[in-house]
Each structure stands twice: as structure tokens, then as C-alpha cells.
Image: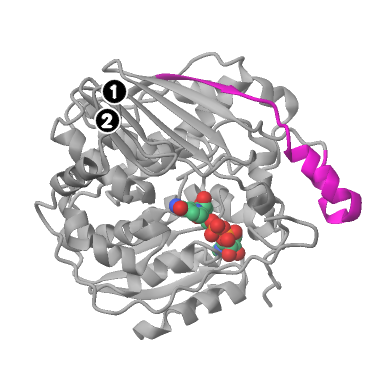
Amino acid sequence: MSKKYNRRTFIQASGAGIAGAGVAGASILAGRPKAAEQSALDHIRQQSQRQRAQRFNMSGYRAPRINTVRIGFIGLGSRGPGHARNMSLLEGIEIKALCDLVPDEAEKARKGIEFAGFSPTLYTGDAEAWKKLCDRDDIDLVYISTPWNLHAPMAVYAMEHGKHVAIEVPAANTLEECWQLVETSEKTRKHCQMMENCCYDFFELLTLNMARQGFFGDIVHGEGAYLHTLLEGNFNKNGYWNMWRLRENEHRRGNLYPTHGLGPICQIMDINRGDRMEYLVSVMSRDFQMNERARQLAATDGFYKEFVEQPYRGNMTTTAIRTNKGRTIMLQHDVTSPNVYSRIHKVSGTKASALKYPLPPRIAIGHRDWVSNEEFKALEEKYAPPIIKRVGELAKQVGGHGGMDFLEDWRLIDCLRNGLPLDQDVYDAALWTSIAPLSEWSVANRSNSIDVPDFTGGSWKTNKPVDILLEEGGNTKVIRAAPPRERRPRPVPEGVQQ
Ligand SMILES: NC(=O)c1ccc[n+]([C@@H]2O[C@H](COP(=O)([O-])OP(=O)(O)OC[C@H]3O[C@@H](n4cnc5c(N)ncnc54)[C@H](O)[C@@H]3O)[C@@H](O)[C@H]2O)c1
């Protein structure tokens, strides 16, 4: 008989799944690092210095075309059902399986795609049910939207079982896991794409095309961030499954969610495709609010007692990265302080610059002022890349973070159906994700610098830039109208301000 799981169940049991997948460093379930380990985090430094010859280059890799992409989804809490819904609108896909530990979540996701007429098998009620989904031989793509510590174990297992993999951000929690994703993808020749949706946001795509056309001159510097107040969301006991996001922030200290700000800047700088990151430093403020919030909540609700007096991540972490070509990147992370939402997205070149946040986005030629609204519109028209011209309006109608979620899902399926290289390969997944553990080391070591590993094994020198011109493919049609988007309600406990 299966155990009963709901959104608050904490399952030690799923540790077995991780061990079974042969992946080290599943941090939450393996228990929290002891204070002494935490202070030096030497295993991170060792992994950062690892060098490895490439076994097979997955950058630019064209996997055999798949006419109908058969998909299995794992993790159907807040994020997974949106991806299932996006995919349901497309031609050339079939949803074969849905998996969530919590039966209600799997059932809700099934209902959400009923309009498309698929009859997926549900895997649920067991922390290892996802393995059964991966074991099937009639699935091409496994799409993972679970808590962070399960991403790499599930992705590795899925690739080992012959599936391409799409993973929500970040791709992993540890450097060991980042290396494992690279090794497994190269060994199995299965794609492993981290679904960094912000690379598909409209201004980010515009500035990428402008950079390609030389508008900014040489790119000197880029800035990105994740400034998004999640304090109450993280403490919401009806929110993230088993408080997983709070637990991550409770014992890992650094830039834990780097990829939203970083991905678009890396594409603009052709990182892993002509340039590479060499080293970084990170400095972190103290925690001003998380322990305080835990104490306030625990005073009236025993549920929160375990969250009091923990070594929480500080409010703000600032990371500075230097690249081989002498460029710099600044990345910030603060999901506690009441900031207006920002991913910054600053592009600074020898001729021009752009800045997305605080909204509205702006472009400047020279140092005097931003261009006027009319000039901005003209630039937008001139430099809009083909993906925006072809699918942009439709993506806005479908929605999901303004349309970028649909664009990323459409593009993934279009690449798989046409046998094209993916826009984000396993080296991008590993590199963009690695900033989190690397920043943890730097923070724990008085902001000293740490090497950024070269996951490409040297192929960054010759890898080709991402195709943003849709020179091939771009022919996957939308064949169903999107039903109204249902936002998953997250009930707020009494006394908690969202
Ligand atoms: N790209 C974006 O804009 C964006 C936005 C939100 C979340 N995310 C990412 O999406 C992922 C999921 O976040 P979320 O907000 O949906 O979290 P969530 O807590 O709402 O959902 C996670 C789901 O995973 C399920 N789960 C846990 N253990 C499982 C197991 N062993 N087997 C199967 N299912 C299991 C839970 O039951 C839950 O339904 C995270 O990586 C997060 O960072 C990305």
C-alpha cells in the first residue's frame, strides 16, 4: 500500500531514490552540513579545479529528429502544470505520463491538459514512482519541475534510461552534480537542457540580437539579478512542497538562484561559445529578516520551531565574475528584502548600453541619455529576432511570465522535432548553475576568489553561438487554443502578509 502524501509531507524515504540514481550531494535529504564543513566548503574548491577531457561535444549536437515528441512530466506543483499546458498546444507532441509524489497534484495536472485529449498514465504516491516513468520505452523527453535537490538525480537517471531531459532552474545543487550532468549527457548523447525561461523574454532576446549585430560594440560588462521578495512565500506552510525552498535558504549561504539574471548575459557574451568564465568572488550581507520571521511565526505556531536560529543565507549576495576575454559580470541575489522585482539585465558595450530593470527597459547610445520612446520602438522593430516575429504575439496570448515560458517550451519541441542543437546545452546548465555552489565557497572564505570550472573541456573556443535567426526549423505549429490559465492558489496562513 502506498503512503499518503500531501504538500507538507517530509519524506526521508526519497533519499533512497537519490542513492539509487547514484548521485552524490542531494543536500536536503543527505542532512545539513556540519558547521566546520560549512566554513570552508573545501569539496567545492576541489570540484572547481577539476579538469576533464570532453568525451563527446554536446554543444551543437543534432540528435535524431523526433516527429512526435512523447513527454513525461515529473513534479506538478506550481510550475510543472504550466509546462504541460504549453506543450499541449503544440503539434507533434504527446503527453504520456504525469508524475508527482502527491496524488492530488498529478490529478490536477491531468485535468489541466484534458482539453488536448491525452490520456497520460499517472505515477504518484511513492517517492520513487518517477523511476517507473523514466523506465518506459515510449517516452522521448522527461520534463522535471521538482525541488532543486531532486533535479540532478532525476535527470541523470532519465538520461541513463534513454531520455532527453528538460530541467527547471537551477539544474542542480552541487558542483558534483553539475559534473555528473555533463558526463551523463556526453556518455548517453541525450540532451540535458535547463529551462532558463528568462533567455526567452522579449527585451533579453532583443538585446541578444542587437549584440549579435554589433549594436553595442564590444561587450564589456553585463549585470543580472534575482531580486524577488519571497520571504512570506518561503515561510508559507501551504506553499512549496515540504517547505523545500525555505530549507534551501536555511543552510546554503550564497547566490542560490543565479540563472535568471545570468543566462541572457551569457548568451550575449557567447559564454561557452567563444568566451568562458574564469573566476568569481561573492560577498554576502548578514541575514536581517529570515531568523526574525521564523521567531515571529514560531511564537504562535509550533510548526515553525525547527526553523528558528538557523544559519540562514544573508539578504543580499553580490557576485563578480571575470571572463577569459576580460569582460565582467555582476550578479545579485536577494529574495528576502522588499525590493521591486528586478533581474537588472544591463548590457554595457563600447558603443551603447541597455538596462531592463527597473522597468521600463531602456537603451542608450553614448553617455548622455536613454533614447526616446520613438527611437526605442524603431530599434525594437529593427532588431526583433525572428522567434519574436514568428511566435511572439502568440506567446503573449498564451502567457506564462508574459509569454517567455511558452517560447521556451515551443523552441525546445521545435529543436527536438527538427533534430537541431538546443539553445541551452548541458554545459550551459552546469555552468550557470555552478555559480550557486561557487558563491557559497567564496562567501564562506571571506569573499576570496574561486575558479569557475570549464565544463566544456576546452571546446568553448570553437563552439558555435546559439542560432537566434531560426535559420532551420521554426515550423512547429500551435494546433490548439489555450484554455484560460488557472493560477494555482497558495493558501496563506493567518497573520502572514504575502
Ligand atoms: N523558471 C521559472 O520562472 C520558475 C518559476 C517557479 C519555479 N521554478 C522552478 O521550478 C521547480 C519547481 O518549483 P515549484 O514552485 O513548482 O515547487 P512546488 O513545491 O510547487 O512543486 C514541486 C512539486 O514536486 C513534487 N515532488 C516532490 N518530491 C517528489 C518526488 N520524489 N517525486 C515526484 N514529485 C515530487 C511535489 O509534490 C510538488 O508538487 C523549482 O526548480 C523552481 O526553482 C522556476
Where is residue 481 shown, x and y percent of the image?
31, 79
Disc 2 designates what residue? 364
Q: Secondary structure at mark 1?
A: loop
- Amino acid found under the numbered disc labelled 1: Arg
- Amino acid found under the numbered disc labelled 2: Ala
Q: Residue at x 41, y 23 (%)?
A: 452
Q: Is residue 463 left or right of residue 484?
A: left
Crowdedness near tag 1: few (<14), some (14–19) or many (≥20) residues, C-alpha within 10 Å = few
Crowdedness near tag 2: few (<14), some (14–19) or many (≥20) residues, C-alpha within 10 Å = some
Whether residue 277 appears in this view of the structure is yes
Give the magenta range.
Answer: 279-308
Q: CA distance from mark 2 to mark 1?
A: 8 Å
Quarter of image, res 285: top right
* Residue at the left extreme of this rendering: 471
Q: Residue at x 35, y 60 (%)?
A: 403
Disc 1 designates what residue? 368
